[in-house]
Each structure stands twice: as C-alpha cells, then as structure tokens.
Image: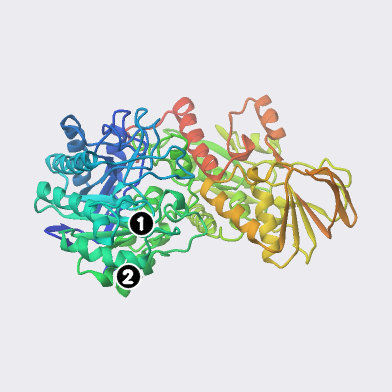
Amino acid sequence: MDNTLLFQPFQLGGLTLRNRIIMAPMETNLASPQGEVTPEMIAYYAERSAGGVGMVTVEFTCVDRSDGLGCTPQLSLDAPQLVPGHRRLVAAIQAGGARACLQLHHAGRQTTPAIIGGRTPIAPSTFESPVFRIGPRAMDDTDIKRVITAFAAAASHARSAGYDAVELHGAHGYLLGQFLSPWTNRRNDAWGGSFKRRLAFPLAVIHAVKARIGAMPLIYRLSADEMIDGGLGIEDTVLIAPHFAQAGVDALHVSTGVAERIDVNVEPIHMPDGWRLPLARQIRQAVKIPVIGVGVIRTPATANQALERGDIDLVALGRALLTDPQWPNKALAGVADQIRPCTSCNWCIDRLAHQLTIGCAENPRAGRELDLPLGRIAAAKNAVVIGGGPGGMKAALLLAESGFSTTLYEKRNTLGGGLIASAVPPGKDKIFRYRDYLLRQISSSAVTVRLGCSPTALDIAAHAPDIVILATGASKRPADIPGGQLAHVAQAYDVVMHDIDIGPGPIVVLGGGETGCEVAELAAAQGAQVVLVSRSPLKQLARAAEAIYRRHLVKKLAANPLITILPSATILRIEPDCVQLHLADDNMLSVPAAQVFTALGRDTGSPLISQLQSLGINVAIIGDAQRISRIGEAVNGAYTAVREHIKRHARVSQPGDPSFTQ
C-alpha cells in the first residue's frame, strides 16, 4: 500500500512534524488527584511517541480548577507549580521523536458540583440538561474575563514547559463551544445573541492565547456538527471556521457532538470508518489553513485515502493508538496486518466512566506502561490453555512469547469463541477484525493448536504443565421453564455462534440482556417477526452492555416495526406453537412462536477446575469461566494471569542473561 502522503513531513505553522499522524487528545485518569503529571502518564505518552506519530496531543488540561474541571482526576496547568511535571512529560514525548501539543480545556456546564468542590457550574446561560442534573449559572463579565485570563495563563505555562503547540478544546460542548452554539448561548449582550456576538468569547480566548505563545502553532478543536436540535450544524461551522483562521488559528481539528450526543463524540462500534471525513472536507474547503480529521480512522489505507482525496491535511488517531501504540511504525514498515485493530468497543470509555484509569480491551498494557516486560522464562516449561476465545488466544500468545511450550485446546473446529458471538449481531462486525488479527498472531507463533478437542484432566496432566489457563467460557444454562426442552427451543447464544439457523418466524426471544436484545435484532434483520420478552423493566434492557452502544441498541429495538418488546413479564410456559406470559398489567398473553430463543443467563465455572487442582496443577481461571463479562476482562485477565504466574512460579531471565529478550 502507498503511504506516501501519510508519512510526508508536514509544516504546521513554523513547526515541522515528521509525518501527518497526530495522537488525538484522550482522557486517561492518570493524573494525580491534584491534577499533576504522574510517572504513569509520562510512560503512557512516551510509548505513543516512540510508536512513530508526528505529534502527541496531551489530553484535555484544565485551565481553572475552581470551576473548569470536567472530571476527576483531570490533568491541570493553572498554577506555576504544575509546570515542572509538564516539562518532564514534554521531554519524554520529544525524546520519542514526536512533537508535544497540549489541549487546554474548561468544562463550563459539562461538569457537576461534586467535581468542582461543591460550586455551581458556569456557562454562557442557564441551561437544563438531561445529562447534568444541576444546571449552571450564567457567567457575568467578571467570570468571562477571569476565564479568558485563565486560558492565557495556562498557555503561558505550556510554553514554559516546552510544549511545541497548543490546542483549544472548543468541541464536544465544553465552554468555548457553549458560547458558539445557539443551543447553549441564549445571552443577549456582547457575548451572545447574534452570530457575531457568539463568536466573541472564543475569539477573545484565541487572541489572549496567541499573545502568550507567540509563534507556537495554535490548533482549535471544533464540533463541525453538534448533531442536536438547535445546535451548531455544518452550515454554521463553515462560516465560523474562517473567523478562527483570520484570528490566527494555525489548524482546525474537526470533531462532532456535545455531552448529550456522546454517541457521536466517542462513537460506538456500529459507526463506519472515517464517517466524519465529509464534514472535515467541508471545513477544509472554507479555510486556507490545515484541517485535522479524526473519528474511526482505523487503518493506514483509510488515513492515506482521506489525504489523497483532499478531505484533510493531518490524521488524528485516538483509540487506535490506545490499542496499538506502534500503529504508525507498523504502517511505515508495510506490515499493516500486524496492527492490533481497535473495534470501537468503548471498554476504555466504560473504565473512565467508572473512575478507573485508562485501559484497552485488546491491549492490556495500555495505562500500565510502567509494567516491566514479561521477559522469557529461564528454563523450558509447558503450559496448557483450554478455550480458544479472546482470553485463551491472548494467554497462549503471551505464554509462548515468554518461552513456555504452549498448547491451546478448543472444543470447536475454529478459534474465536466469544469474539464470534460478539461480532455476529448487526453493526458489530469490527470485532471480526480483532478475531482475525489474533488468528494471524497464533498462526505465526509457536503455539500448538488442537481444534475439536475437549481434553480431560488426565489429558492435560500428561503435558506436565507448569500452568493451566482455563478460558472455557460460560456454560449454557438450561431453560428452567415448562416446555423449555421442546424441539423448537434453542439457546440465543447458539444463534450468534451460528449453531442454530433463524427461521422465518414468528420468533420469541426470552431474556432482555445484551444477548437477547442482539438476537432479537438479528432475527428481525432477517425478516422475522420478533417478540422480545424481558423479565426486567424496559429501562434495564441490555443493562450490562457498554453504555453508549446500549443506548443505540435499545433505540433501534424500539424503532424496529418487526420487534415487539414486552418488559416486566413472567414466562409461564412454552408450548409447541406459542409462549404463555403473565404481563406487567396482570393480563395473560399467548404469543405465537415457531422458534423460541432463550437468553436467561449462563453459568461460570467448569468441572476441570477441581479435577486439575486435585492433581496438584496450577490453574488460573479467566474470562467468562470466572465471571460473565466482556472481551476486555478476558484479554486483560489473560495478561494478569500470565504475569502473576511468571512472577510467582517461574524464574525469568534478566537483562544480561543469554536468554533474555524484551
């Protein structure tokens, strides 16, 4: 593939980048509670710089912790004492060959009193939001001048810390964007009302920052379309963009959305590759400064094609670099098939939402870059992995890379396990990319694969294993319902594993969890009339699914004319041609059913656990065999299990030993 444009040096203002790839700013929760740079954060960004990007944009950094924090912990630069930590971070980034850019941020209304020390959030206008239950107070002139000064002071600190460029976060509904948008700016003074007056605050911040940073490039991140009624659309932002260029902005970073449309901010799995590029192209046609494109740019081919078409001048990679920091280096080397692909599963976003540090479903080292390499064991040992799903394949690869003679057993005739079940529902085919990546890795590894095999404890013991990783997944739970054993009743999980064909219907799906909801949508996509029966209330449909994807899934189910949802229902019995239900309104209902698919839960554990332990064999249990969870838990569990076993039971060769490798 021709990557000529992607790896051309690029001139951004007076700054030369080694290529056209930028690391997009992403929240990490790696800062200290006081907003300081930490060793973990330095290692995280240093690894992405070493991966070959032209510039690293450090995550959103608060310019005023008194009322500007958008989360906690959040990186900050509102005081001189924070500069030394940033200086160390910049040095680490630049040592890897990338330029260092800092994104400056004020949350405005998109925060809560709990985050900002009990204070009421501030915004251009008072505003009621379904996301942030406590509305902000309208800023007065004193507030406005204070925040402009705070942006300028933070920019000055960034310059002192050695950053090569500064980005203003005016996208995603934060304070700068709140002043721009008629949806959130309802003032009728010098700072709002008309188009020109809504520009006043961001332009004032741009001028104030430019005065402090001199010739350093200034980037402005903009939501080209807020995708909400009454908000900014592309017809507005193509008029706004030239004003920013005229004010001295050196590049525009084109994104979308606000807090209420987080689904177009951190896109869930169904969004197509490069979906924002047409918006970026329209912005680029309106200005004569570089435009940065971002959003589900997952492959070098997509990136280079966007450059060749003239959609954008620079490519920003976010979650793609979380998944594989070596993305640029691998693309440059012509081994794009070795790039670990981001599937947009948003496991990373779920972690942040639960106040955890950044992590990745496919890359267990993301956010844990200070972990020492696993190294190689000093003496040959055997390892056995049971189960060829995501956790099992990852465990087998890690064990083989660490020097274990590794055998991977899978009872089916193909590897993939839960990855197949996750990828089959509509809009989730990106997961096949990760399955295929793991298959390529297994194929080129020293792992011995035995398909179609369910070994006994004695079979496993015959390997004399130093460690057994049990990744067998969860077992199917029989439908404990009268009629549950009838011939037309099957497990929903078997449907997504392609063990059961979907007929013409009518179909009843019993169970409103993620699997039940997805099988209902899958059956409807094949033209069947479907009734989805949930024992839980409507608001709890697919409640364990990733939050942004769940919102999209439930919305699609509710809008599908082929799907009827019956929440809070009791399943009385299954009959040969129908299902008898007791509904929430106390009525009885007989629902016709040519097929019944049950999604009423699966069970963890395996008889092999106690059998192997009774033989004195070290056993580590991961993934659904341990706890029903997601791909990220399985893959990260594999990393933890292998790492802990090596630490406890295997002498690892150290630097200087003949067998040591990274």
Q: Residue at x 51, y 45 (%)?
A: 394
The furthest residue to the right: 576
Number of numbered discs visible in the structure rendering: 2
The furthest residue to the bottom: 309
Q: Secondary structure at mark 1?
A: loop
Residues 324 and 68: in front is 68
Q: Amino acid at mark 2?
A: Arg
Residues 453 and 380: in front is 453
Q: Residues within 10 Å of mark 2 (few under 14, many from 20)?
A: many
Q: Position of residue 326 (x, y in %)?
A: 34, 52
In this rendering, position of residue 581 left or right of residue 502: right
Q: Residue at x 39, y 42 (%)?
A: 366
Q: Earlier in the sequence, mark 1 or mark 2?
A: 1
Task: Give the labeled residue for mark 1.
Answer: 182
- In which quadrant of the rendered view does residue 128 lie? top left
Task: Give the labeled residue for mark 2.
Answer: 281
In this rendering, position of residue 109 left or right of residue 19: right
Q: Quadrant of the N terminus?
A: bottom left
Q: Residues within 10 Å of mark 1 (few under 14, many from 20)?
A: some
Q: Is residue 432 above or below residue 471?
A: below
Q: Position of residue 189 (x, y in %)?
A: 25, 51
Q: Secondary structure at mark 2?
A: helix
- In which quadrant of the rendered view does residue 256 lie? bottom left
Q: Amino acid at mark 1?
A: Pro
Q: Position of residue 447 (x, y in %)?
A: 52, 48
Q: Mark 1 and mark 2: span between their CA atoms?
A: 23 Å
Q: Position of residue 145 (x, y in %)?
A: 19, 42
Q: Is residue 360 above or below residue 65?
A: below
Which mark identifies residue 618?
Answer: none
